[in-house]
Amino acid sequence: MPSEWHQRLTPREAEIVNCLLRGWDNQLVAEHLGVALGTVKKHLQNIFGKLGVDGRAALIFQAACNREPS
């Protein structure tokens, strides 16, 4: 995960991003963190908004390029 993202995200959001970058689906993330699936989905909405991406694929692409979303 790009280091700049840590400044924008809460610790829990950063943890969820790391799970996504491992290729985990929402259900696996929820089980790993011990939260409801809806909680993961709400965190993802917040993450996508903060990082300026429109979804999981764009987030993964931006992380792979190691650059800030535009």
Image (cartoon, rainbow, N blue to C red):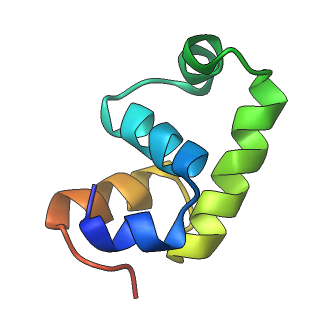
| Residue at far bottom of view | 70
Residue at 70 percent of width and 61 percent of height: 46
Q: Is residue 40 left or right of residue 36?
A: left
Quarter of the image with the N terminus in it: bottom left
Observer able to see residue 53: no
Q: Is residue 5 left or right of residue 25?
A: left
Q: Is residue 4 above or below residue 61?
A: below
Q: Is residue 53 above or below residue 63?
A: below
Within the image, what quadrant is residue 41 found in? top right
Where residue 51 appears, as percent x and y from the top left, is 51, 72
Q: Is residue 34 above or below residue 29?
A: above
Observer able to see residue 45: yes
Within the image, what quadrant is residue 10 found in? bottom right
Where residue 29 appears, as percent x and y from the top left, is 56, 23
User: Count of labels shown?
Assistant: 0
Comparing 1 with 26, the one in front is 1
Comparing 61 with 32, the one in front is 32
Quarter of the image with the C terminus in it: bottom left
Residue at 79 percent of width and 35 percent of height: 39
Within the image, what quadrant is residue 17 found in? top left
Residue at 65 percent of width and 71 percent of height: 49
